[in-house]
């Protein structure tokens, strides 16, 4: 092989050799070509100025990293909060609709009566607080005392257990005998918190009409005594002065207590919507 | 006539309860005239409670007795007219 033999050999090598047998080249013995050959085949000198490609650990480029997890949590949390907000708005809208529909029952309303000291008390004075109203008369044999005791017990229980202040009110259906002084003496024996209200015939008729209270004075005996037949109901009025619920003789203290609690909670939620 | 205060009310109710207990005992022992047997207690009851209340409680007792009888002994249905 002559001079061309080197190139031919290279080609030959690249085509057929697999092992490092490239050193087997017959070359003309010559210093210049020797250096050239060295440069060609000497791997160490070739790589002196070039950094070998770094053998990095194959990075697992997965989907789940701390960063993506954080982003998902924030976005998911935001969506959840938005969904809860929308749900709450919907519930409030439904409750308001229901309330508006029930409000058409039209029981209750404004009244202007006198308290035990003869001062004029209007229904507006009680806006901002819950009220339980019971209609009765001081000459009542047994029902009114029982119901008023029940009402006072409920109010005390709500005050103690729930810090919910409910104003108990007694309104007389017997204006002829139940003057402000008489009513004051009567209610004082049940509770200092019980407010007794009375008025003249016209005022009492007005408030009885507003609350759909039936009353009828019975026949008088020789002592001019008579019993007034009347509706035996406790009315629950909310801080907006609206009638909310009624409780008859068959409901006991526990039942009425729970019912008032639920109404108060519902009212607070409607008027102070928060996140929870 | 002024209304009864709390104490007077409970005295009246107590005398009523005593009278009714006597009546219950007399009726249970199948006495012919329970009211006569408990006459003394009735006098006390009538003195402690206003007349209207006595009438009211008598009506109440009749109703309670009637209710009890219906529950325990059943009732005779009114015969229906044949259509």
Image (cartoon, coloured by chain):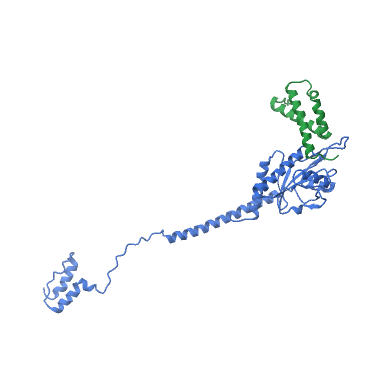
Chain colours: A blue, B green
Q: Is residue B4 left or right of residue B68?
A: right
In the image, residue A15 lies at what x, y percent?
Answer: 19, 67
Q: Height in image: B48 above or below A1?
A: above
Q: Is residue A229 left or right of residue A264?
A: right
Residue at x-position 83% and y-position 34%: B52
Q: Quadrant of the N terminus of chain A?
A: bottom left
Task: Tell how many labels.
Answer: 0
**Which residue is outermost to the right?**
A222
- Asked if one can make out residue A148 in the rendered structure from this viewpoint, the answer is yes
Residue at x-position 80% and y-position 31%: B45
Frontmost residue, A185 versus A222:
A185
Q: Where, by quadrant of the figure, is residue A65 drawn?
A: bottom left
Residue at x-position 83% and y-position 35%: B50
- Asked if one can make out residue B60 in the rendered structure from this viewpoint, the answer is no
Q: Where, by quadrant of the figure, is residue B77 drawn?
A: top right
In the image, residue A26 lies at what x, y percent?
Answer: 12, 72
Frontmost residue, B60 versus A38:
B60
Frontmost residue, A150 versus A31:
A150
Q: Height in image: B79 above or below A58?
A: above
Residue at x-position 49% and y-position 60%: A74
In the image, residue A82 lies at what x, y percent?
Answer: 55, 57
């Amino acid at each position: 092989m002559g001079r061309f033999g080197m190139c031919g050999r290279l080609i030959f090598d690249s085509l057929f050799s697999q092992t490092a047998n490239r050193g087997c080249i017959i070359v003309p013995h010559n210093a210049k070509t020797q250096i050239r050959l060295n440069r060609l085949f000497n791997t160490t000198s070739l790589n002196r100025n070039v950094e070998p490609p770094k053998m990095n650990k194959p990075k697992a480029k997965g989907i789940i990293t701390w960063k993506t997890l954080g982003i998902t949590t924030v976005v998911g949390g935001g969506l959840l909060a938005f969904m809860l907000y929308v749900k709450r708005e919907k519930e409030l809208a439904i409750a308001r609709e229901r309330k508006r529909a029930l409000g058409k029952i039209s029981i209750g309303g404004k009244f202007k009566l006198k308290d035990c000291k003869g001062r004029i008390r209007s229904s507006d004075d009680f806006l901002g607080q819950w009220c339980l109203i019971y209609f009765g008369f001081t000459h009542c044999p047994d029902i009114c005392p029982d119901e008023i005791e029940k009402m006072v017990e409920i109010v005390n229980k709500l005050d103690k257990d729930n810090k919910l202040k409910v104003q108990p009110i007694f309104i007389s259906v017997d204006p002829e005998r139940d003057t402000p002084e008489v009513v004051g003496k009567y209610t004082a024996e049940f509770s200092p918190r019980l407010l007794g209200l009375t008025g003249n015939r016209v005022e009492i008729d007005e408030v009885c009409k507003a609350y759909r209270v039936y009353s009828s004075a019975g026949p008088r005996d020789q002592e001019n005594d008579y019993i007034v037949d009347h509706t035996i109901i406790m009315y629950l009025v909310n801080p907006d002065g609206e009638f909310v619920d009624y409780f008859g003789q068959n409901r006991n203290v526990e039942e009425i207590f729970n019912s008032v609690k639920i109404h108060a909670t519902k009212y607070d939620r409607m008027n102070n919507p928060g996140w929870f | 006539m002024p209304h009864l205060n709390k104490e007077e009310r409970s005295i009246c109710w107590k005398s009523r309860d005593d009278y009714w207990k006597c009546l219950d005992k007399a009726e249970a022992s199948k006495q012919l005239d329970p009211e006569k047997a408990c006459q003394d207690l009735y006098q006390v009851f009538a003195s402690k409670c206003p007349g209207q209340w006595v009438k009211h409680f008598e009506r109440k007792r009749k109703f309670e007795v009637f209710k009890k009888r219906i529950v325990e002994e059943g009732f005779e249905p009114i015969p229906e007219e044949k259509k």
